[in-house]
Amino acid sequence: MMGEHEAETVSLLVRSWVAGSSPLADPGRALGTGLPVPRAQALEVIESARSLAVLGLTDGCPAVSSPALVRSQLGDARFSELCLIADALVVGQHPSVAEWTAGDYRVAVEWTAVLIQRWGEDGVQRLVAELSGS
């Protein structure tokens, strides 16, 4: 999980990126080339991100049991920033992203944002390793 200083640094970075850009009509959907993972269905990616995000939690621990709970804990702005990072740097770079539905894409972004909130870059590396079969 990111510390308060790291989270604030990321927040400032994302806000600076967003301030200097205009929204894409279809963010991330056409990229799908940056992650060194095999092609996969969205549900496989979602399940991998979800299982890694909740790894080690005891039953009944609601802290990160859903993206909605994390959004309510962090606030809309902070969670949206995490989603921007998850979209641009992880989910939008998956080689199969163009084949996923918009709904599945959104869910993958949200669970990846939860994963990043809880585990930071280590979580992303674990996700890449799991999707690669490593």
Image: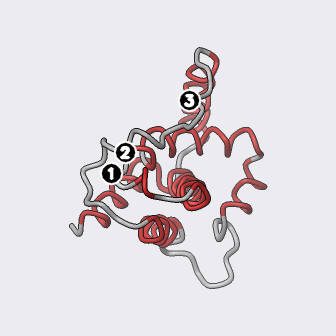
Residue 119 horizontal/vertical position (percent) = 47, 55
Pointer 2 or 1: first along the chain:
2
Q: Helix or strand or loop: what does disc 2 sit on?
A: loop
Q: Relative to residue 81, is residue 104 depicted above or below?
A: below
Which image quarter holds the C terminus?
bottom left
Cα separation, mark 2 vs mark 1, equals 4 Å
Q: Helix or strand or loop: what does disc 3 sit on?
A: helix
Q: Is residue 25 left or right of residue 34?
A: right
Q: Amino acid at mark 2?
A: Gly
18, 40: nearer the viewer: 40
Q: Relative to residue 15, is residue 78 depicted above or below?
A: below
Classed neighbour count for the residue bearing mark 3: other residues with Cα under 10 Å, few (<14), some (14–19), many (≥20): few
Residue under pointer 3 = 9
Residue under pointer 1 = 95
Can you tell which quarter of the image residue 34 is in? top left
Cβ atoms at labels 2 and 1 below 8 Å apart? yes
Pointer 3 or 2: first along the chain:
3
